[in-house]
Image (tube, rainbow, N blue to C red):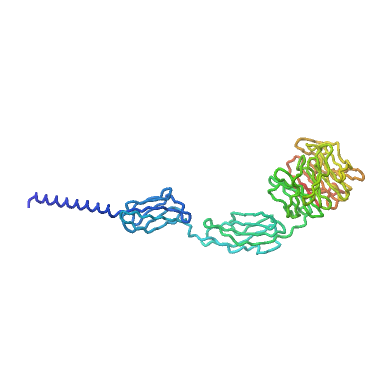
Amino acid sequence: MTIKIYTRYIAIIISSVLLCVGCSEDTIDAQGLGAIEGKVVAAGTNEPLANVKITTNPSSSTVFTDAEGVYRISDVSSGEYSLTAQKDGLLAQFESVTVVADGTVEVVVEMSPETAANKAPQINGLLVPEEGAIDQPIELTLTWSAEDPEDDTLTYTVTLKNDRNTTVELFENIADTTYTVSELLYGTKYFWQVTATDGINTPVNSTIATFQTIAPPNNRIFYTRAVADNSVIYSSDETGQNEIRLTALDKNSFRPRKSPTTQRIAFLQLVGTKVHLFTMNTDGAQLQQITTNVPVVGFNLGEIDYAWSDNGAKLWFPNQDTLYSINADGSGLQQVYKTTNGKLISSVAVNDALGIIALKTNNLQGYEVEVFTITTAGQMQDMILSGVKGAAGGVHLSIDGSQLVYTHDISGFENAAYRQLDTHMFLYTFSEQRTVDMSIEKPMGTNDTEARFSPNQAMLIYTHAVNDGVAAPSIQIIPIANLADRTQLIDNAMMADWK
């Protein structure tokens, strides 16, 4: 065989091989490739999931879902595959897929959070106080039992309601299974519930349990204290102890006055831009607004005072230059007296058994004061103070109507801010028409204001403060027979009433 013949045979063989290779590639392209496409969504909500990694086993292309959760893998050889969807924070999801030549298989994948298998916590019980417990203190530590199957960190919320009002108190982000609640209402049934959360599952609620607080102490002194931006009313016993908060911290309430007959506390409260009369029980319960159409109005709301009738059936209050009376249930509003010189009424005291009403009036700036009495029919009786300079106030009648106490700034100082420099208490005896200075032992640079008789008429209770207008006032008492025996009773308080 010659070299030419070998050469020709080799060329034929190479051509045949190339032809066969070309035939094999055409067959795969036409018959062996398909595609996988679909969408990845959140389990339960069907919200599209973007940037989910999609792979197959056996391996093909790796793709990611678009903003609409859509993906597509092209040119996948026909056969059986396991499709995998992966994204941080989600459980990997596997789907079986059969790819056929020249076909597109659609696979929708639902993905769940990695915590989907996590179990919820459980609250085993509310332990302290026991269900239905009575005579519980107004500061109380609540205790419960809870656990989590995976030992996840739990936080708790305590919900507290009561049978006296619609207030719902929430104490949140509690890390322990105990929580101390304070300033509970006396004599009140409470309902409490604990909610536990592991930050993964839906929060779990306990059952609802109840307890009853102790009855209130027999406090006889009522007063006002500034708390944040509001005035709040409190009570205490006659030693200044066992303090109880009676009005809400988010309400501006002041000037409490107790009716010994009905055991109701009257007070002033800001409603919008106006001040109205309210009443409540001595423990703050059964709140009732008394005035509606005619508010309490004067030159300075911090100086305005009003009075109960002896039997607790009426309240007497000023509105500018007019004195009104209103029944304790809010009915029967009547005009009683109107000043004849246009001056404003600021203080009212009443002894209706004797038919006496004591008033303090002043001009728009609070000066040109007059303290006098009228009959319940509005007829002028005694002029006690007039023609003096400086502020005055604190008008209160003794139980028998024989004496009246009031205050007056003897410095005669007057300015636009109504600042007082040297205010003294004065005791006026009607039968003798005699006035006695009750503040002769008062320290210099201080004021004695808002004076009132004690229940036995042997002492005066009053507000004492440094005259700079900055230092917190206090409530003091002083025996009428011993003016040197001044006793500090309650710190950071004013507008006292002792019944």
Towards the viewer: 363 or 454: 363
Residue lying farthest to the left in this orientation: 1
Residue lying farthest to the right in this orientation: 432
Tell me what residue is drawn at x 83 percent, y 53 percent. Answer: 311
Q: Quadrant of residue 335?
A: top right
Tell me what residue is drawn at x 53 percent, y 55 percent. Answer: 199
Q: In the displayed structure, does residue 376 sit left or right of residue 88? A: right
Tell me what residue is drawn at x 39 percent, y 53 percent. Answer: 38
* Residue 81, above or below 357: below
- Residue 349 on image: x %, y %: 83, 46
* Residue 100, above or below 384: below
- Residue 243 on image: x %, y %: 74, 53
- Residue 249 on image: x %, y %: 69, 49
* Residue 180, above or below 380: below
Is there any visible trace of residue 492 in the rendered image? no
- Residue 43 on image: x %, y %: 46, 56
Towards the viewer: 471 or 290: 290
